Amino acid sequence: MADISFIIDELEGHVLRKRVPVPIVHGIKGIVMVDGTQKFYPEYIYVADTDAYAHWLWENPPSEKVTLFTAGDCFLLDPLFKMKSFNIVSTDLSVFSLYNIVNRVIIKYREWRNSVVDDIVKGKSISEMIEAASERLNGYVILTNPGGKVMTSSVKGTFEDPLTQEIIDQGFTPYNTSLFFRAELKSCGKSYPDLMKGLFPDKGVTYYLKKIRIEGGTAAELLVTLHSADKAFDTEAAINGFGNVIGAILARSKEKYLIHNKAFTTLLQDLSDNKLESDAEVRNRFRLLTVPVEKYVYCVIADFEEDGVSDEYILHQLDSVFPNANIAKWNNQFVIMVSMPTHEYNLDRIMDVEAVNKVLKPLSGKAIVSYATSKYDKFRTIYRLTHRLLEIIKCLDVTSNYGNIYRYMDYMIYLDIDMMAKTYQMEMGHSDIIYMADHGIISLARYDAEHKSGLVDVLMNYLLNGSNVAKTAEVMYMHRNTVLNKINRINKIIEADLSDGMTQQRLLYSCQVVKYYKEVMANTLRI
């Protein structure tokens, strides 16, 4: 594409009049000298000698949205300057001088465009295209995700710039550098709304930052650092167009889903590494995420056991059921940050439970949903607790009311037991955490081990269902009378008042300790 304003600037004060309703012209094929015989086509720029063809132009004005430069000016051109269908610029230059200046710029446009198209035709990767662009621009070119993580970059520039080199060496845009770019770089205007530029004579460099958007969200950023530039070359148009090409390649490939979420991946990495030291830093990084974050955030972690399924496919599936969430592959699991304007307790308001289960079940997947927080700096804590509980649930024989989705709040007691078990083993020097359980439940567990009666499970489900025999029978797929008989037997063994609230709490916790001991720790009670 060609920026007519740039060509006008190249004419260096020789412009007499101009009307440019279409400042950006796409797909320029070349320049044509008006000879009084041709038709006008929008993909060409025309140069006319006013002395020879002003009357002809007056009688045959262009009907297409073309761009016309004239050598000289006269009243016969007045009607053309009143028309809104095309660009017209009159100058005081001779036709040959005008042609040479415009042609020099057009040649540069075409050379750049042809080189990029040639890279695409040859099937070059994005990394190879970035390296080639670096050589043509004679500078540094870096592609990062929205969180500042370097996706690919040119190997090195032909000059030294410590700031750019630091980004390449670290593989990440430092927080202070990111703030510097956003404070010092200015928009390149309406023609290039996603391109920012900053000229720093003291550093001897110019920085360009191009936002690459996919489906309305920022998928990547292109940073270009130049020491000097060819004045006849429209660097802004070249970088903006190149960024659009990279965006189109990303959008057409499955790579889109990985790149779309790398900002979130980077955030998880930095939270894990404790690189973000203050709440302000965390909040600023949250603002860089691809999907805007609302007041309350939930951490959803999905784990899939099905082999042979690509990450891209799973990310695509999760993206379809969590359309307004940030998603990333992290620690061999998929982390989804769901955000809501209000604190929701009903799982159906947080996600489409049926749709999510349709993704999880065919791939033998499980997902756990954390509680919500409005304190973004505590997301690391929420993630770690939720991740740890999911690993526990994978060992437990439990059934969720939500299919393959587990609510943190429903199973958090097992996380408490897990932490107790770790501390217990360090303090006591052995793993027999059943000493933390009621002695009656230990007796009940030993009776189960000898008679295969499952009384601990019956008691636990009985207590979890509000001491309701009918509900317990339904949950355990037993006849009501069978449950009653087992409850009676339990009463005889543990000799406890099952109607007392404190007793119920103690016995339920003890049942859960025994369940953790057997299923998570894989220990066996000695008879």
Image (spheres, grey):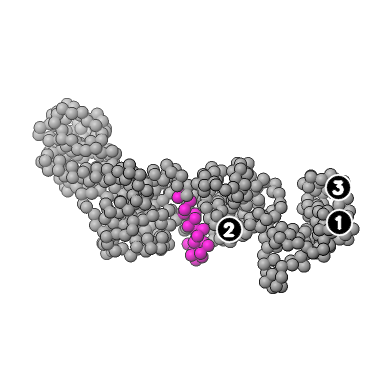
Q: Residues within 10 Å of mark 2 (few under 14, many from 20)?
A: many
Vertical placement of residue 264 versus 424, above or below: above
Is 112 above or below relative to 228? above
Disc 3, SS:
helix
Q: Name the residue type under label 3.
A: Thr
Marks 3 & 1, CB-CB < 8 Å contact:
no
Q: Name the disc covering residue 61, or none.
A: none
What's the magenta bit mostly, secondary-structure-wise? helix
Magenta stretch encompasses residue 421:
no
Give the mark nearer the N terminus: 3 vs 2. Answer: 2
User: What's the residue type where badge 1 is placed?
Assistant: Ile
Comes first in the chain, label 3 or label 1: 3
Q: Quadrant of residue 191?
A: top left
Q: Residue at x 42, y 62 (%)?
A: 175
Judging by the rendered image, the residue that carries numbered circle 1 is 490
Name the element at disc 2: helix
Q: Which residues are magenta?
A: 259-282
Number of numbered callouts drawn: 3
Q: Position of residue 23 (x, y in %)?
A: 27, 41
Query: Is label 1 in a helix, a strand or a loop?
Result: helix
Indicate the position of residue 375 as horizontal and vertical percent values.
56, 59
Residue with the mark numbered 2: 383
What x and y, as percent, mark residue 33? 15, 35
Amino acid carrying label 2: it is Tyr
Q: CA distance from mark 3 to mark 1?
A: 12 Å
In the rendered image, the residue lying farthest to the top is 59
The image position of residue 127, as x and y in percent, is: 37, 52
Residue 482 is marked as 3
